[in-house]
């Protein structure tokens, strides 16, 4: 539907309901602290790039951004009951390791309507330290002209060997928009991707230092 800032086939009312639920859903489970929430643009095209260390990162950010948000989600999540709900709330399935431009094309359309698209450049869950990054986020930003906003989360991943945690502290740090280097072709895309990766890696170190000092 034109003007909804959501992909075709979404149900805007269902998206807004899910986002409202997301604003309080994790309160009983985590003590969430958001640093520099004022840096989240309320309007305009935004590619939100974030590190990824736990399943909850995506749903948590979905509820925190304060506006409609379309995330690129691994295709495996679209199986079962959840898989029927995700397209209705405007999320896009991505087949990792397979050439498929359809979700990226749909994401560009959202951005050109002034929407927000969330991407985890690492491509999969891990330590969340941004040791590597895929090209998708930089390609979206360069193709659409959207602002690139870096966000990092720490505390969602359970440390190896630890048991169940009671309301662990989770910190979310919102960075300043990134200036991607100019330049076309694969070299330009690689340089832009490295800019995204390095910025997120630096923010992870900054947030880790903040967490250890408080």
Image: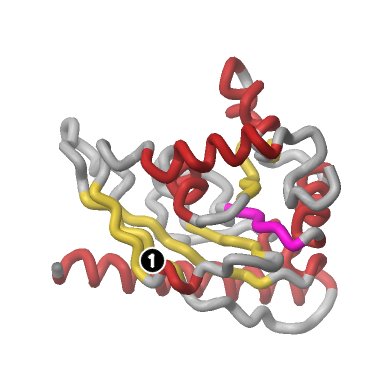
Q: Give the side of residue 41 with respect to residue 96, left or right.
A: left
Query: Which is nearer the eye, 34 or 4?
Result: 4
Q: Position of residue 45 (x, y in %)?
A: 70, 65
Q: Position of residue 123 (x, y in %)?
A: 58, 48
Residue at the image position 54 percent from the left and 53 percent from the top? 122
Indicate the colouring scheme: secondary structure
State yes or no: residue 158 in magenta: no
User: Above or below — where is 152 with respect to 166?
Assistant: below
Locate the C terminus and report the quarter of the image it occupies: bottom left
Q: How many marks?
A: 1
Residue at the image position 50 percent from the left and 73 percent from the top? 198
Locate the N terminus and report the quarter of the image it occupies: top right
Where residue 162 sits, quadrant-wise, is top left
Q: Residue furthest top?
A: 80
User: Above or below — where is 4 with respect to 136?
Assistant: above
Q: Give the side of residue 73 with respect to residue 110, left or right.
A: left
Residue, disc 1? 173
Where residue 78 sits, quadrant-wise, is top right
> Residues in magenta?
114-119
Residue at the image position 65 percent from the left and 57 percent from the top? 116
Q: Position of residue 95 (x, y in %)?
A: 70, 36
Q: Give the side of residue 26 with respect to residue 48, left or right.
A: left
Where residue 115 sits, quadrant-wise, is bottom right
**Secondary element type, mark 1:** strand
Q: Does the magenta stretch mainly form a helix, a strand or a loop?
A: strand
Query: Which is nearer the eye, 82 or 94?
Result: 82
State yes or no: residue 117 in magenta: yes
Mark 1 nearby-residue class (10 Å; few <14, some 14–19, many ≥20): many
Residue at the image position 71 percent from the left and 33 percent from the top? 11
Q: Position of residue 161 (x, y in %)?
A: 19, 36
């Amino acid at each position: 539907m034109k003007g909804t800032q959501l992909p075709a086939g979404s149900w805007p009312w269902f998206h807004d309901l899910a986002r409202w639920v997301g604003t309080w859903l994790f309160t009983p489970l985590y003590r969430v602290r958001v640093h520099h929430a004022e840096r989240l643009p309320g309007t305009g095209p935004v590619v939100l790039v974030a590190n990824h260390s736990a399943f909850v990162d995506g749903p948590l950010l979905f509820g925190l951004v304060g506006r409609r948000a379309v995330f690129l989600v691994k295709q495996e999540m679209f199986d079962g009951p959840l898989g029927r709900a995700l397209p209705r709330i405007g999320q896009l399935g991505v087949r990792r390791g397979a050439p498929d431009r359809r979700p990226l094309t749909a994401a560009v359309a959202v951005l050109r309507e002034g929407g927000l698209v969330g991407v985890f450049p690492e491509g999969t869950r891990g330590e969340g330290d941004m040791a590597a990054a895929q090209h998708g986020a930089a390609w979206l930003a360069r193709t659409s002209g959207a602002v690139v906003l870096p966000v990092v989360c720490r505390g969602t991943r359970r440390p190896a060997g630890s048991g169940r945690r009671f309301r662990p502290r989770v910190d979310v740090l919102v960075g300043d928009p990134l200036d991607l280097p100019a330049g076309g072709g694969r070299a330009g895309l690689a340089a832009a991707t490295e800019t995204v990766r390095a910025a997120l890696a630096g923010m992870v170190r900054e947030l880790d230092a903040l967490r250890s000092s408080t």
